[in-house]
Amino acid sequence: MQKERALNYVRYFTVFISLKIKVQFRLLSFKVVYKLLIYNKIVGNLYKVTSGYQVNQEII
C-alpha cells in the first residue's frame, strides 16, 4: 500500500515537472518570437529612414 502511494506521488511529481517545463519553454519561445518581431520592426524602420523609402513608395 505504501509502495503504491509512493509510486503515485512520483508519477504526480514527474507530470507536474514536465508540465512546468512545457509552460516555461512556451513562455521562452514566445519571448524570443516577440523580440524578433520588435527587432524586425526596428530594422524595417531603419531601412525606410536610411533608404529614403516613403509610404507611397517614392524615393526621395
Image (spheres, rainbow, N blue to C red):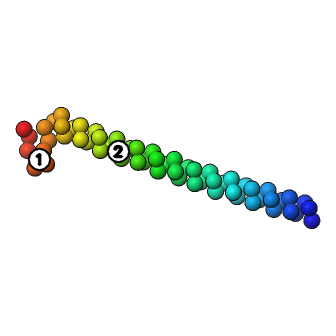
Q: In the image, what residue occupies the spot 19% across and 40% down?
A: 48
Q: Is residue 38 left or right of residue 58?
A: right
Q: Residue 28: where, in percent of width, then height? A: 51, 47
The residue that disc 2 covers is 38
The residue that disc 1 covers is 57
Q: Are marks 1 and 2 in contact (CB under 8 Å)?
A: no
Residue type, label 1? Gln
Which of the two marks, 1 or 2, is nearer to us in this view?
Answer: 2
Q: Residue 31: where, in percent of width, then height? A: 46, 47
Q: In the image, what residue occupies the spot 36% across and 47% down?
A: 37
**Which residue is situated farthest in the bottom direction here?**
1
Q: Quadrant of residue 53?
A: top left
Specify the quadrant that holds the C terminus. top left
Q: In the image, what residue occupies the spot 29% across and 40% down?
A: 42
Q: Is residue 52 left or right of residue 10?
A: left
Circle 2 sits in a helix, a strand or a loop, which is it?
A: helix
**Which residue is situated farthest in the right direction here?**
1
Residue type, label 2? Ile
